[in-house]
Image (cartoon, grey):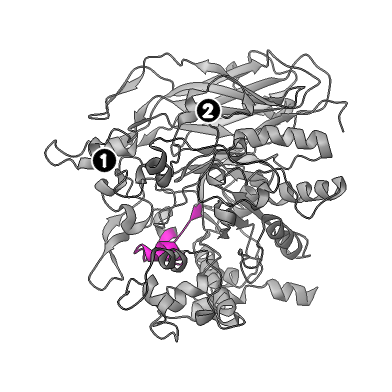
Amino acid sequence: MLNKRRDFVCVTALLAVLLTGCGGTDLDLSSNQAKNALGSNPQRSECVSKNPLNSAYFGDLHVHTSISKDSYGWGVRLSPDDAYRYAFGEGEVLLPPNGKNGEAGTRAVAIARPLDFAAVTDHAESLSETRLCIDKNSSSYNSEHCRVFRGRDKGVDISVAGIAKLMNPFASRNTELCGDDGEVCAQLDRDVYGEIIAAAAEWNDNSEDCERTTFIGYEYSSVRLGSNMHRNVIFRNNTVPPNPVGVLEAPRAWMLWDKLNKDCIESGTECDVLAIPHNSNISNGRMFAVDYPGANSKDEQKARAALRIKVEPIVEIMQHKGDSECRNGLPDVLGAVDELCEFEKFVKMTDKIRRGADEVGDCYNGPLADIVPHLGPDCLSSLSFVRNALTEGLKEERRIGVNPYKFGLSASTDTHNALGGGVTEKTWPGHLGMADNSTEKRTAWVKNMGNTSNNPGGLIGVWAPENSRDALFDAMKKKEVFGTSGPRIQPRFFGAWNYPKSLCRSTDRIEQAYSQGVAMGGDLPKKLSEAPVFMASAMADVGTPAQSGTSLQRLQVIKGWVGDDGISREHVFDIAGDANNGASVDLDNCEQSGSGFSQLCAVWQDPEFDASKRAVYYMRAVENPSCRYSAWQCAQFSDVERPESCNLPDVRRAIQERAWSSPIWYTPPTST
């Protein structure tokens, strides 16, 4: 046991402390932060602010810095330390365009509202290759790969295929850089990862104030056969394996789950971890595909499904590459059109050019579908979207006894500018360095590879008794979490068999909701009853002194189930507020009009309940219409100065921001 524990002590963070000129954080080795960086988990102070009925804390668990190869390649020079300084409101950071020396940005930005918690999640892939290419003392600095990466391409073959390979942040090990056995890069990966660990330790508040919480993390970035299969890996505390697990170490997702389970959760140490899949919307149906390669028997498939939901209890439903909740017009889902499913859809540029429309074809689901390549979001599948995965999980639970898609719902930004929590539409400075560092680029369509498909991203909300690592992590594991598209809406969702109709009017309604039922992320107790009863509520975001929040328009409950014919069904119920309240926004000046609500609450009973069928329910809280960033930022120009891109007809300008609760599940009492 002692040897195993010693393996988990993050000695790499000490190496990061000793590094100079590489963006490492200087720490006093006698400080608590330094002890944390070395992997110890000392007894922390109890938070002064503690709520037994839980408070809403907002964070971002998807943040990239210059350590990620794609961020650095687009001119970002911000370190993990810079990312936390921004996220927690401790000062400005500098974005591209960079100065003459190319090392410091010239655009100063600061967060309008500091986060409660955050994690830097740089790509596990190419940590060392990036460092070797930017370190002038590296023997690889003048290699072909590094010269192309840095943009010094004179005399270098830079064919389109060559650039795609060299600039791909998820490429396989380059032997020119890493050596034939890859050991040079393996060791440097550990050192660079240590810098991420050290920054998290430096910024985590262990005092009784509990003002800010950090998590150690990274991104696992598989693009298997051109499909997005990315996950963010988040650790509970400072006890972590010494190297991040990337695609090289775990080519398939179940290999990642297995390694995280064996090397962390079941290691006999204090290590604990969860993974959060994201961007299923561009996975070509593969993120939630019902396949178990290598697991042939039903028992093997059941074990694989149980492993998945053990390691991946929550999913990211929204980020800067779009909304992954739902999509209309899918052939294998029955239900009325949900107009709110048109929200922030990512459109692949090549499809826009090739087809002359936003739509793409259906994914191939026939024999050997698991090995058919697609390039980016090349096809549509119901299993690219979270809502449909939730009902697919009901089918699997009926078939093998385990639901692999029984996940809570979250959101984050996926910023590649190190701007965790920078979600204000009006002032959003972009997400990828030089790629969208001006209003013209951010609102361009064809000219800049479809940047208008992107957006500021969202936030993860957590209901927890205090703002500490253990409290937040426990809430994430039990799925009492929610996602927002940016605003700090506070949704609550409870289910029971006997909530009184008057519950919303009770001053102690939250206490009653907990004592008599289950919160979001939970299962209704198995029993025969007339129908489950839900209490759904939400508080609108009040905004900031500089910009007021937007009123709520309505609350909805989305129900999913599977018919006797095996086809997924869905129904969206409006349960509070008013969809026809006449609220609107003037896209020329972004002034809002119409009525709305500062808070909404409803007790709702399913009118279509069938006790014999499994069902899943989640809540959506929707704001009145407001300006999207593309309208806010274009409105700042006079007609003469306005960029041409601001007049493109395809650019979306109005949105209805929202929040999604984690689901509550119903299982028939006679089922296994």
Which is nearer the eye, 603 or 459? 459
Where is residue 390? Give x, y as percent: 67, 35
- Outermost left residue: 640
Q: Residue at x 70, y 39 (%)?
A: 406
Inspect the magenta stretch and tell me whether residue 75 lies in it.
Answer: yes
**Snapshot quadrant of residue 515:** top right
Q: Which residue is mark 1?
A: 633
Write down the region rendered in magenta. 62-83
533 above or below 351? Answer: above
Q: Residue at x 50, y 29 (%)?
A: 341
* Residue 484 in view in this figure: yes
Where is residue 605? Give x, y as percent: 67, 16
Q: Which residue is mark 2?
A: 328
Which is nearer the eye, 390 or 287? 287
Which is nearer the eye, 219 or 221? 221
Q: Amino acid at mark 2?
A: Asn
C-beta proximity under 8 Å, tags 1 and 2: no
Q: Earlier in the sequence, mark 1 or mark 2?
A: 2
230 above or below 603? Answer: below
Q: CA distance from mark 1 to mark 2?
A: 29 Å
Where is residue 200? Give x, y as percent: 52, 63
**Snapshot quadrant of residue 179:** bottom right
Inspect the magenta stretch and tell me whether residue 268 lies in it.
Answer: no
Tally of numbered tags: 2
User: Which mark is nearer the camera, 1 or 2?
Assistant: 2
Q: Amino acid at mark 1?
A: Gln
